[in-house]
Amino acid sequence: MYRLAHLSDPHVPPDGSPRRRDLFSKRAIGWVNWRRNRHRIHRRDVLDALTDDLARQSPDHIAVTGDLAIVSTPAEWQSCRAWLQELGPPDHVSLVPGNHDAYTRRAIPGTALAWREYMAGDPDTSAHGGFPYLRRRGPLAIVGCSSAIATAPFMATGRIGHEQIERLRPLLKALGDEGLFRVVLVHHTPVRTSGDRYRRMTDAGAFRELLADAGAEVVLHGHEHRTTLHWISGASEPVPVIGVSSASAIAHGNRPAAQYNLYEISGEPGAWSCRMRVRGFDGGGLLELSDTLLFEAGRATGEIAKVP
Ligand SMILES: [Fe+2]
Ligand SMILES: [Fe+2]
């Protein structure tokens, strides 16, 4: 059995305030918002307790689907890198960036450099540099995509882009032909759950069409700060699209406290079984919250709901 953990959106709380010269335009607005509201929601002690619990589960691999940063200053790139190193070495942790990591145009090359080993494909694959990247781990083919783009203030949209989609198509088909369990990582959900046009993946329709054509076994995402499961069309079986709560959050509004998902994958090509266990805070403690069978002997257990 192979065990994959998924966590997301740690928004790693910084030790101090950013340098004044790093706060301009969108970063200044975002920092004021953080100090007014969000620093009470995302807490370092919560993040540390969650990652300690995850370490005790000793998963074979860890997937992180972005939003490590808050306003993505150079100091944050380094503190987020330190957090990644606490989580594990680069070959044990696969990362894709979120919109907070691409907070400004300058942040995109900054995070790409600071976190590069965690976002690199295996050196012997054609999908080595940039996105999508490919990592083979046990029965898994981990395919990391980027939906992180710099946006105007108050916008948190994402986009995969035509070029990435057309690189993904032959890659996912070939990995499917190889019989690997394809895990697609992306920050924004391709399922429009909230209808919020300021937070959506703008080319979600094209991304869903790609998955319906080429297939994948699971799509893991962040951004929504809640644990969700939707099924969309795949090449043969339906594809579960799974989000996870923020790894550093206390419960707030209709969003739950910090959680992570643990996938247990067994079986063989064409007959995979996969269950998803959700662990997180409930009341005062950290415990297992649910246990869901996603695939049994190659058959998906869920049905495709109408996707808006
Ligand atoms: Fe986030
Ligand atoms: Fe996000």
Image (cartoon, rainbow, N blue to C red):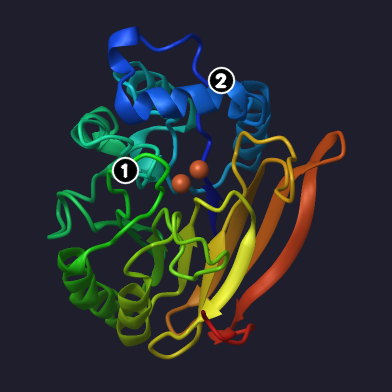
Residue 87 % position (x, y): 49, 32
| Most distant residue in the bottom direction | 236
**Residue beneath the point at 38% across and 62% down:** 201
Above or below 106: residue 231: below
**Image quarter of residue 88:** top left
Residue 53 % position (x, y): 68, 35
Q: Can I make out residue 1 in this image?
A: no
> Which element type, helix, strand or loop, lies under badge 2?
helix
Q: In the drawing, does residue 240 fall left or right of residue 234?
A: right
How crowded pointer 1 is (Cα within 10 Å; few <14, some 14-19, many 20+) is rated as few
Q: Mark 2: which amino acid?
A: Arg
Q: Which mark is residue 293?
A: none
**Residue beneath the point at 56% across and 68% down:** 193
The mark nearer the N terminus, 1 or 2, is: 2
**Residue closer to the observer: 83 or 35:** 35
Residue 186 % position (x, y): 39, 57
Residue behind mark 2 = 35
Q: Mark 1: which amino acid?
A: Ala
Above or below 245: residue 29: above
**Residue closer to the observer: 66 or 54:** 66
**Image quarter of residue 142:** bottom left
**Image quarter of residue 235:** bottom left
Q: Can I make out residue 58 in this image?
A: yes
Residue behind mark 1 = 152
* Dots 1, 2 in contact, CB < 8 A: no
Above or below 222: residue 241: below
**Residue closer to the observer: 195 or 142:** 195
Looking at the rendered structure, the number of numbered marks drawn on it comes to: 2
> Which element type, helix, strand or loop, lies under badge 1?
loop
Closer to us: mark 1 or mark 2? 1
